[in-house]
Amino acid sequence: MEIELTASMMCADYGNLEKEVKNLEEGGIDSFHIDIMDGRYVPNFAMSLNDLRYIASTASKPLDVHLMIEHPNNRIDLFLSHLRKKDTVYIHPEAEYHPSTTLQRIINAGMEPGIAINPGTSVETVMEMLRIVKKVLVMSVNPGNAGQMYLPYVGKKITKLLALKEDMDFELYWDGACSADKILDFAPKGVKGFVLGTTLLFGKEKTYGETLQNIRQLRF
């Protein structure tokens, strides 16, 4: 079973960012997850437009840009102008008056459209958008900070989404508190990819290559 592993770059060592990107790519990472936070939609500031621009210019692997900002449609071109055709842009439906308009702009720019679903967001409220997007990022923690605890009730939401994904043609991704046991549990059920942060990838004694190899060798 092949799964996609993406590195949560807000957890990277910013004193050696070029080296971090290189080591992750050499270690076998599939993509780079870029968390953009405005301090309004979520109570924190994380990565910036300049961080996105630098990683996009340094990395050869795709970017997954996660916009945790209010009204992304107002500034979406700022982000799209630095991305490539194979990159993904996630928005939060609650952050926009007309999220389908923003998603269409992402599509028109040639990027992969996605939505991120918070723990408190029901599947029913995003049902029509599931027909538009190619990727759905399920937050297993409340957005805004790394190192949070998994919220168990999110598992039932994932079960609902897995039952819809083939008919609506989207893939499901996991973000937050991603440990080996979560991958072992949810990958066989149909979750395509996992965002790796401090729980499993960063700040460990093993190299990125060793960690990623160990994850890919898990017996599903």
Image (cartoon, rainbow, N blue to C red):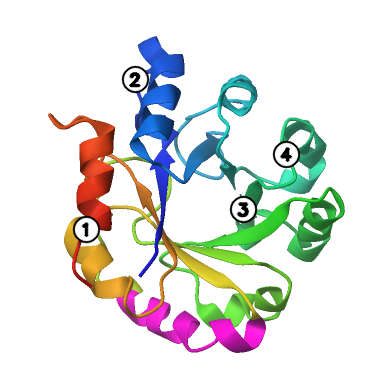
Badge 3 is on which residue? 90
**In 3D space, how far apart are the residues under numbered discs 3 and 1 (Cα atoms)?**
29 Å
Q: Which residues are magenta?
A: 155-168
22 or 187, nearer to the observer: 22
Nearer the observer, disc 4 or disc 2? Answer: 4
Precedes in sequence: disc 4 or disc 1? 4
Q: Secondary structure at mark 4?
A: loop
Write the residue at 69% across / 73% down: 129
**In 3D space, how far apart are the residues under numbered discs 2 and 3 (Cα atoms)?**
24 Å
Q: Quadrant of residue 145?
A: top left
Kind of residue at badge 4: Arg
Name the spot of residue 8 as percent of width and height, x first.
40, 39
Label 1 crowd (10 A; few <14 / some 14-19 / many >=20): few
Label 2 crowd (10 A; few <14 / some 14-19 / many >=20): some
Kind of residue at badge 3: Tyr
* Residue 23, placed above or below residue 67: above
Q: Quadrant of the N terminus?
A: bottom left
**In 3D space, how far apart are the residues under numbered discs 3 and 4 (Cα atoms)?**
14 Å
Precedes in sequence: disc 3 or disc 4? 4
Does the segment drawn in magenta span residue 57? Answer: no
Kind of residue at badge 2: Asp
Asked if the residue under mark 1 is in contact with the one under mark 2, i.e. CB atoms within 8 Å, the reply is no
Name the spot of residue 73 as percent of width and height, x first.
78, 47
Label 3 crowd (10 A; few <14 / some 14-19 / many >=20): many
Mark number displayed over residue 84? 4
Asked if the residue under mark 1 is in contact with the one under mark 3, i.e. CB atoms within 8 Å, the reply is no
Precedes in sequence: disc 2 or disc 1? 2
